[in-house]
Image (cartoon, rainbow, N blue to C red):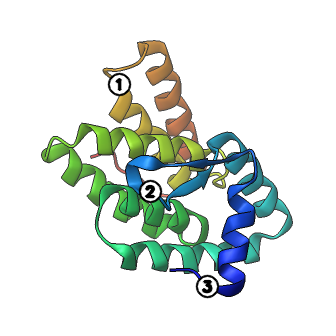
Amino acid sequence: PLRGRSARLVASLRELRFVQAIPARGAEAFCVHHTNRQTLRAWWLLTEAEKVRETSRRAAACFAEAGGEPHLQIETLYHRFAFEPDAAVDACWGVADRWMKAGQTESRLALANMLDEVSSTLPRGLARAYALLESAATRFERQDLSHTLARVEEALVEAESSGQDWVLT
Protein backbone atom coordinates (compact mmCIF):
# COMPACT_ATOMS: atom_id res chain seq x y z
CA PRO A 1 0.00 0.00 0.00
CA LEU A 2 1.13 3.52 -0.80
CA ARG A 3 1.79 5.94 2.02
CA GLY A 4 2.66 9.57 2.50
CA ARG A 5 3.77 11.54 -0.51
CA SER A 6 3.30 8.58 -2.89
CA ALA A 7 -0.33 8.12 -1.83
CA ARG A 8 -1.04 11.83 -2.27
CA LEU A 9 0.61 11.88 -5.70
CA VAL A 10 -1.39 8.86 -6.90
CA ALA A 11 -4.63 10.40 -5.59
CA SER A 12 -3.85 13.63 -7.49
CA LEU A 13 -3.04 11.74 -10.69
CA ARG A 14 -6.28 9.74 -10.56
CA GLU A 15 -8.29 12.97 -10.59
CA LEU A 16 -6.89 14.06 -13.96
CA ARG A 17 -9.34 13.62 -16.85
CA PHE A 18 -6.84 11.76 -19.00
CA VAL A 19 -6.13 9.12 -16.35
CA GLN A 20 -8.37 6.10 -16.67
CA ALA A 21 -9.05 3.12 -14.43
CA ILE A 22 -8.26 -0.40 -15.61
CA PRO A 23 -10.78 -2.49 -13.64
CA ALA A 24 -9.69 -5.74 -15.31
CA ARG A 25 -6.32 -5.39 -13.58
CA GLY A 26 -7.67 -4.59 -10.13
CA ALA A 27 -9.20 -1.76 -8.15
CA GLU A 28 -5.91 0.14 -7.90
CA ALA A 29 -4.89 -0.11 -11.57
CA PHE A 30 -4.94 2.97 -13.78
CA CYS A 31 -3.08 4.49 -16.71
CA VAL A 32 -2.74 7.68 -18.72
CA HIS A 33 -4.96 7.55 -21.82
CA HIS A 34 -2.86 6.41 -24.79
CA THR A 35 -3.28 9.62 -26.82
CA ASN A 36 -2.04 11.75 -23.95
CA ARG A 37 0.68 9.24 -23.13
CA GLN A 38 2.02 9.35 -26.70
CA THR A 39 2.10 13.13 -26.71
CA LEU A 40 3.75 13.33 -23.30
CA ARG A 41 6.30 10.66 -24.18
CA ALA A 42 7.29 12.43 -27.41
CA TRP A 43 7.60 15.79 -25.65
CA TRP A 44 9.60 14.36 -22.72
CA LEU A 45 11.96 12.56 -25.08
CA LEU A 46 12.61 15.84 -26.89
CA THR A 47 13.01 17.96 -23.78
CA GLU A 48 14.36 15.59 -21.11
CA ALA A 49 15.61 12.46 -22.87
CA GLU A 50 18.05 11.37 -20.15
CA LYS A 51 15.43 11.77 -17.43
CA VAL A 52 12.98 9.68 -19.51
CA ARG A 53 15.59 6.95 -19.95
CA GLU A 54 16.34 6.84 -16.22
CA THR A 55 12.67 6.88 -15.23
CA SER A 56 11.93 4.16 -17.79
CA ARG A 57 14.84 2.07 -16.47
CA ARG A 58 13.34 2.22 -12.98
CA ALA A 59 9.78 1.57 -14.24
CA ALA A 60 10.91 -1.45 -16.29
CA ALA A 61 12.60 -2.94 -13.22
CA CYS A 62 9.46 -2.35 -11.17
CA PHE A 63 7.16 -4.02 -13.70
CA ALA A 64 9.60 -6.91 -14.26
CA GLU A 65 9.66 -7.61 -10.51
CA ALA A 66 5.85 -7.44 -10.28
CA GLY A 67 5.28 -10.71 -12.10
CA GLY A 68 5.01 -12.46 -15.43
CA GLU A 69 1.45 -11.65 -16.45
CA PRO A 70 1.21 -10.49 -20.07
CA HIS A 71 0.29 -6.88 -19.20
CA LEU A 72 3.33 -6.63 -16.89
CA GLN A 73 5.62 -8.03 -19.60
CA ILE A 74 4.20 -5.47 -22.05
CA GLU A 75 4.76 -2.62 -19.56
CA THR A 76 8.33 -3.80 -19.01
CA LEU A 77 8.98 -3.84 -22.75
CA TYR A 78 7.32 -0.44 -23.23
CA HIS A 79 9.80 1.12 -20.84
CA ARG A 80 12.80 -0.85 -22.14
CA PHE A 81 12.23 0.63 -25.60
CA ALA A 82 12.99 4.05 -24.07
CA PHE A 83 16.40 3.21 -22.61
CA GLU A 84 17.67 0.10 -24.43
CA PRO A 85 15.73 -0.28 -27.69
CA ASP A 86 17.96 -2.97 -29.23
CA ALA A 87 17.73 -5.22 -26.16
CA ALA A 88 13.98 -4.51 -26.04
CA VAL A 89 13.66 -5.81 -29.61
CA ASP A 90 15.31 -9.11 -28.66
CA ALA A 91 13.13 -9.49 -25.57
CA CYS A 92 9.99 -8.48 -27.46
CA TRP A 93 10.68 -10.94 -30.26
CA GLY A 94 10.96 -13.74 -27.69
CA VAL A 95 7.71 -12.75 -25.97
CA ALA A 96 5.81 -12.39 -29.26
CA ASP A 97 7.11 -15.76 -30.49
CA ARG A 98 6.13 -17.52 -27.24
CA TRP A 99 2.66 -15.98 -27.30
CA MET A 100 2.16 -16.85 -30.96
CA LYS A 101 3.10 -20.49 -30.36
CA ALA A 102 0.84 -20.61 -27.27
CA GLY A 103 -2.10 -19.08 -29.15
CA GLN A 104 -2.24 -16.03 -26.87
CA THR A 105 -3.88 -13.81 -29.47
CA GLU A 106 -5.19 -11.17 -27.05
CA SER A 107 -1.75 -10.77 -25.49
CA ARG A 108 -0.15 -10.40 -28.92
CA LEU A 109 -2.71 -7.78 -29.93
CA ALA A 110 -2.00 -5.84 -26.73
CA LEU A 111 1.71 -6.09 -27.53
CA ALA A 112 1.02 -4.77 -31.05
CA ASN A 113 -0.84 -1.80 -29.55
CA MET A 114 2.20 -1.01 -27.42
CA LEU A 115 4.52 -1.35 -30.42
CA ASP A 116 2.35 1.05 -32.42
CA GLU A 117 2.64 3.53 -29.61
CA VAL A 118 6.41 3.30 -29.12
CA SER A 119 7.15 3.27 -32.85
CA SER A 120 6.00 6.88 -33.03
CA THR A 121 8.71 7.97 -30.58
CA LEU A 122 11.57 5.60 -31.39
CA PRO A 123 14.53 7.03 -33.25
CA ARG A 124 15.02 5.86 -36.81
CA GLY A 125 16.60 2.44 -37.06
CA LEU A 126 16.14 -1.25 -36.47
CA ALA A 127 14.15 -0.97 -33.24
CA ARG A 128 11.56 1.17 -34.99
CA ALA A 129 11.58 -1.17 -38.00
CA TYR A 130 10.94 -4.13 -35.71
CA ALA A 131 8.08 -2.36 -33.88
CA LEU A 132 6.38 -1.54 -37.18
CA LEU A 133 6.90 -5.00 -38.64
CA GLU A 134 5.79 -6.97 -35.56
CA SER A 135 2.68 -4.81 -35.25
CA ALA A 136 1.82 -5.36 -38.92
CA ALA A 137 2.45 -9.12 -38.70
CA THR A 138 0.28 -9.47 -35.60
CA ARG A 139 -2.67 -7.67 -37.15
CA PHE A 140 -2.25 -8.87 -40.69
CA GLU A 141 -5.44 -10.99 -40.68
CA ARG A 142 -7.42 -8.38 -38.72
CA GLN A 143 -6.92 -5.25 -40.77
CA ASP A 144 -7.15 -4.03 -44.31
CA LEU A 145 -4.27 -5.41 -46.38
CA SER A 146 -3.29 -1.92 -47.54
CA HIS A 147 -2.61 -0.91 -43.91
CA THR A 148 -0.43 -4.00 -43.38
CA LEU A 149 1.50 -3.33 -46.59
CA ALA A 150 2.06 0.32 -45.66
CA ARG A 151 3.48 -0.73 -42.27
CA VAL A 152 5.73 -3.35 -43.85
CA GLU A 153 7.01 -0.85 -46.43
CA GLU A 154 7.69 1.69 -43.67
CA ALA A 155 9.54 -0.99 -41.67
CA LEU A 156 11.69 -1.93 -44.66
CA VAL A 157 12.62 1.70 -45.30
CA GLU A 158 13.57 2.05 -41.62
CA ALA A 159 15.68 -1.10 -41.67
CA GLU A 160 17.45 -0.20 -44.91
CA SER A 161 18.17 3.37 -43.80
CA SER A 162 19.70 2.17 -40.53
CA GLY A 163 22.85 1.01 -42.28
CA GLN A 164 22.88 -2.06 -40.02
CA ASP A 165 22.61 -5.66 -41.08
CA TRP A 166 19.15 -7.07 -40.56
CA VAL A 167 17.40 -10.34 -41.19
CA LEU A 168 13.72 -11.15 -41.30
CA THR A 169 13.02 -14.49 -39.65
Asked whether residue 141 appears in the rendered view, the answer is yes
Which element type, helix, strand or loop, lies under badge 2?
loop
* Residue type beneath disc 1: Phe
Which element type, helix, strand or loop, lies under badge 1?
loop
Q: Observer-nearest residue: 26 or 163?
A: 26
- Name the residue tied to disc 3: 3
The x and y percentages for residue 62 are 47, 78
- For residue 44, side relative to residue 72 (left or right): right
Which of pointers 2 and 1 lies earlier in the amino acid sequence? 1
* Residue type beneath disc 3: Arg
Q: Residue at x 31, y 45 (%)?
A: 107
Other-residue count near label 3 (Cα within 10 Å), few / some / many at <14 / 14–19 / ≥20? few
The x and y percentages for residue 64 are 39, 74
- Name the residue tied to disc 2: 165
Q: Which mark is residue 119?
A: none
- Name the residue tied to disc 1: 140
Asked whether residue 134 appears in the rendered view, the answer is no
- For residue 60, side relative to residue 94 (left or right): right
The x and y percentages for residue 6 are 66, 80
Residue 144: quadrant of the picture: top left
- Point out the frontmost of discs 1 and 3: 3
Q: Residue furthest left?
A: 102
Q: Is residue 88 above or below residue 93?
A: below
**Circle 2/circle 3 CB separation < 8 Å:** no
Q: Observer-nearest residue: 100 or 17?
A: 17
The x and y percentages for residue 141 are 31, 20
Other-residue count near label 2 (Cα within 10 Å), few / some / many at <14 / 14–19 / ≥20? few
Which element type, helix, strand or loop, lies under badge 3?
loop
Q: CA distance from mark 2 to mark 1?
A: 25 Å
Q: CA distance from mark 1 to mark 3?
A: 45 Å
**Circle 2/circle 1 CB separation < 8 Å:** no
